[in-house]
């Protein structure tokens, strides 16, 4: 029996963590992630979980302690945002290359500077090549479900990579939604018991973790990490199938909305997809063939699914909630554009950077993007490749 | 008090054949520390000579579980391991009693890792932290650290026409750690092995964090013949450059006081890193160093007397 309870995105993470009941949590507070640590600390204080919590003195130590705990053989979690993620950067890479299945909810927040506490994706986009799996959630329901899912993804023997579960700061993390939560037992059964290979605490079979790895082996180890990310493309669908069987929700790497016959398409991550769906519905009522593609899993990059979803479109706008400062557009744009390179007939593709530092995005903005696309399709004008949506000129 | 016959029979956690320089103090320190417990031990190490020379993939010199994470975070890393141990023990997934020890060089401890160490001490994890202090970043080529003694020539404080080497005093890390009011803090030297192993035993035994600051000779950086490692380390103690003290539950105590403290030049003279101090124009620096050592000694005596009075 599922039940529906009012939860913010942060509380949804904490609730999922309560059901996961990890062995160790090491975390440091930062807005807008703070409520996760606070809610979870309450579960610990009230004996509702068996977790040992480490109230570290920084995010650098949070990720360092997570590496120690996960290597020791504990199911391990942390959570962070923006500057916290930046501070743990060095160890974020080490966690992935040590192949430790740490799960880290990240509440997306603009990375300093200038300092800002509101939503954009500059924090996790900067970590997109760190070897972590990245899942982006539209709402608190997804946050809840993906946090549970992430445990299985991280620990899958063919993957063994850490996972970031990303949600939009304040928009999702602090907005209250009715979230359908699963029975504790069902969650327990789904995640199962964690059985690590060669944990550090197996004192009868001693292992050396984190050795110096020079010219003669480093390359193969990085190659293995890359192959693990590739095999995640095959392994994740199996886990998603089990997830559907257990909980009834069907997930895929991507979500498509009214995309089958769509001529003009917006691609966007996370909560903005809700606004886009609203505008798509309006346009459809007026007979305009608009659609949405929302990548849910960005790492590994679901190239084939994205190509299939976009190949019939006439014009596509990629909305990036972070800039890459390459002078060539945001990360989602450049990657999707590259993915479509091998197609003979490609849709027109443009980029909109939007919502930096929590700048609101309104249906009117989305409408304007669709209008732009319509006009380009009708060859009424050529759009600049990289546009800034909702920014003062 | 350690019994040498018993110790000789104890299995070694760090095997020979590692790639630390012959005569390196670090491996001697590690082996003596590990003699301080008969329980299984998990070792953590910061990046530095000890780590890079004992774990070159696909080889490892460690016969016991070992983890290296990064340069500045061995204390945080071992706190994760130790917490995992408590979590799994509570759930009955681990039965045995296990001890935890983290090794960091002076760079990884006094400098870049100080925050991580302070955090782990304050949180009260049950582990032993050992700083093997060779007074510079040796692994990267003898750069100064905040543990480098005044007057030492390093590659980033080279002695020259306008420089007598490092200008600043060493950071007093032992006192900083003592200010965390953890159960056990001590300074030791491998030349006084019985004292060091006894301190390691105490450190492993206490419930909560323990810290050992151990002078660790590096003939590459200090410039002395490699066979003199223990001789130099003895001189560090006999001159009062490296006092053998402990702070047990807040009580400061001298564990060894030379009958007559030798002048510090006897420690400085055999080391090439101080060679320039013996030039006429730098003589006053030698005097300053002697004065610094006398002052520190007086300070420690004061602390120890006060400590004794309270008991
Ligand atoms: C974040 C970071 N900065 C710098 C380095 C380069 N580095 C590696 S070891 C080291 C010095 C180690 O000195 P110490 O801790 O005293 O150990 P020793 O080599 O002297 O035994 C430095 C600077 C690094 N690995 N990581
Ligand atoms: S350089 Fe110094 S510290 Fe490093 S291994 Fe050699 S003697 Fe030991
Ligand atoms: Mg050093």
Image (spheres, coloured by chain):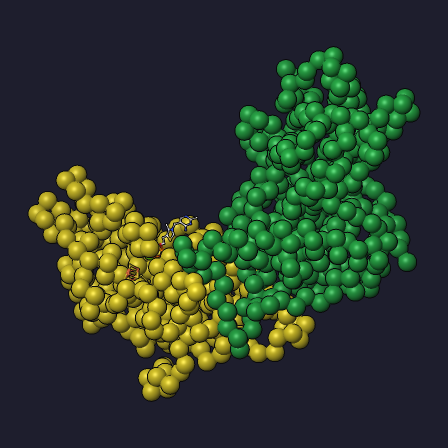
Chain colours: A green, B yellow
Asked which quadrant contains residue A353, the reply is top right
Marks counted in the figure total 0
- Left or right: B35, with A172 as reference point: left
Residue A86: % across, % down: 55, 42
Image quarter for residue B35? bottom left
Q: Residue furthest left?
A: B280
Q: Position of residue B178 (x, y in %)?
A: 42, 60
- x and y percent of residue A168 in the render? 71, 38
Q: Would you place residue A352 above or below residue A66 in this image?
A: above
Task: Give the residue furthest to the top.
Answer: A380
Asked where in the image residue B21 lies, by quadrant, the reply is: bottom left
Residue at horizontal 64 percent and vertical 18 percent from the top: A384
Viewer can see residue A218: yes
Q: Residue at x 49, y 56 (%)?
A: A220
Pick the residue in front: A176 or B258. Answer: A176
Would residue A322 be visible to someone looking at this image? no
Taking A227 as reference, is B146 left or right?
Answer: left
Left or right of B60 in this view: B82:
right
Task: Report the quarter where the C terminus of chain A lies.
Answer: top right
Residue drawn 65% across and 46% down? A300
Q: Quadrant of the N terminus of chain A?
A: bottom right
Q: With respect to residue A203, does A223 lie above or below?
A: above
């Amino acid at each position: 029996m599922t039940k529906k309870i009012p939860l913010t995105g942060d509380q949804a993470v904490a609730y999922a963590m309560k059901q996961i009941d990890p062995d160790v949590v090491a975390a440091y507070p930062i807005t807008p992630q703070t409520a996760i640590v606070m809610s979870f600390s309450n579960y610990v204080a009230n004996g509702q979980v068996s977790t040992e919590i480490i109230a570290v003195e920084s995010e650098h130590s949070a990720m360092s302690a997570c590496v120690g705990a996960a290597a020791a053989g504990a199911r391990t979690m942390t959570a962070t945002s923006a500057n916290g993620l930046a501070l743990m950067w060095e160890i974020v890479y080490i966690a992935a290359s040590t192949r430790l299945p740490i799960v880290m909810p990240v509440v997306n927040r603009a990375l300093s500077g200038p300092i800002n506490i509101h939503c954009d994706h500059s924090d996790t986009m900067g970590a997109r090549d760190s070897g972590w799996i990245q899942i982006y959630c539209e709402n608190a329901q997804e946050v809840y479900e993906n946090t549970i899912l992430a445990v299985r993804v991280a620990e899958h023997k063919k993957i063994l990579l850490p996972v970031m579960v990303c949600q939009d700061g304040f928009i999702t993390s602090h907005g209250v939604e009715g979230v359908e939560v699963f029975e504790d037992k069902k969650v327990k059964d789904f995640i199962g018991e964690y059985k690590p290979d060669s944990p550090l605490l197996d004192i009868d079979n001693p292992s050396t973790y984190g050795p110096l790895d020079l010219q003669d082996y480093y390359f193969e180890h990085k190659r293995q990490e890359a192959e693990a990310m590739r095999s995640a493309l095959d392994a994740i669908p199996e886990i998603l199938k089990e997830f559907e069987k257990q909980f009834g929700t069907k997930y895929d790497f991507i979500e498509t909305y009214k995309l089958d016959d769509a001529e003009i398409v917006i691609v966007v991550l996370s909560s903005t997809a809700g606004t886009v769906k609203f505008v798509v519905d309006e346009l459809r009522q007026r007979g305009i063939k608009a659609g949405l593609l929302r990548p849910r899993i960005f790492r590994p990059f679901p190239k084939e699914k994205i190509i299939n979803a976009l190949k019939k479109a006439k014009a596509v706008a990629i909305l990036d909630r972070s800039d890459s400062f390459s002078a060539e557009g945001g990360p989602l744009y450049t990657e999707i554009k590259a993915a479509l390179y091998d197609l003979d007939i490609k849709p027109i593709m443009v980029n909109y950077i939007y919502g930096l530092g929590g700048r609101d995005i309104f249906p009117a903005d989305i409408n304007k993007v669709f209008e732009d696309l319509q006009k380009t399709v009708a060859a009424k004008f050529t759009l600049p490749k990289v546009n800034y949506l909702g920014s003062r000129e | 008090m350690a019994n040498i016959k018993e110790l000789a029979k104890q299995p070694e956690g760090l095997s020979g054949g590692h790639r630390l320089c012959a005569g390196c103090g670090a491996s001697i320190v590690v082996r003596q520390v590990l003699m301080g417990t008969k329980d299984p031990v998990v070792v953590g190490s910061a990046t530095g000579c000890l780590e890079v020379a004992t774990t070159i993939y696909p080889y490892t010199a460690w016969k016991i579980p070992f983890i290296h994470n990064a340069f500045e975070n061995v204390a945080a890393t071992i706190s994760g391991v130790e917490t995992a141990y408590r979590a799994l023990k509570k759930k009955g997934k681990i039965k045995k009693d296990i001890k935890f020890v983290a090794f960091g060089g002076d760079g990884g401890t006094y400098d870049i890792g100080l925050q991580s160490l302070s955090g782990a001490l304050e949180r009260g994890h049950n582990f032993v932290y050992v700083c093997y202090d060779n007074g510079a970043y040796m692994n990267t080529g003898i750069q100064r650290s905040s543990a480098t003694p005044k007057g030492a020539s390093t590659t980033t404080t080279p002695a020259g026409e306008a420089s007598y080497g490092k200008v600043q005093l060493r950071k007093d890390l032992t006192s900083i750690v003592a200010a965390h009011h953890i159960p056990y803090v001590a300074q030791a030297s491998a030349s006084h092995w019985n004292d060091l192993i006894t301190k390691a035993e105490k450190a492993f035994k206490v419930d909560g964090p323990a810290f050992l600051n151990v002078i660790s000779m590096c003939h590459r950086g200090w410039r002395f013949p490699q066979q003199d490692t223990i001789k130099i380390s003895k001189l560090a103690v006999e001159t009062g450059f490296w006092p053998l003290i402990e702070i047990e539950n807040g009580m400061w105590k001298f564990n060894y006081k030379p009958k007559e403290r030798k002048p510090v030049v006897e420690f400085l003279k055999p080391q090439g890193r101080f060679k320039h101090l013996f030039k006429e124009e730098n003589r006053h620096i030698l005097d300053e160093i002697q004065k610094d050592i006398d002052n520190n000694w007086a300070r420690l005596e004061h602390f120890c007397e006060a400590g004794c009075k309270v008991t």
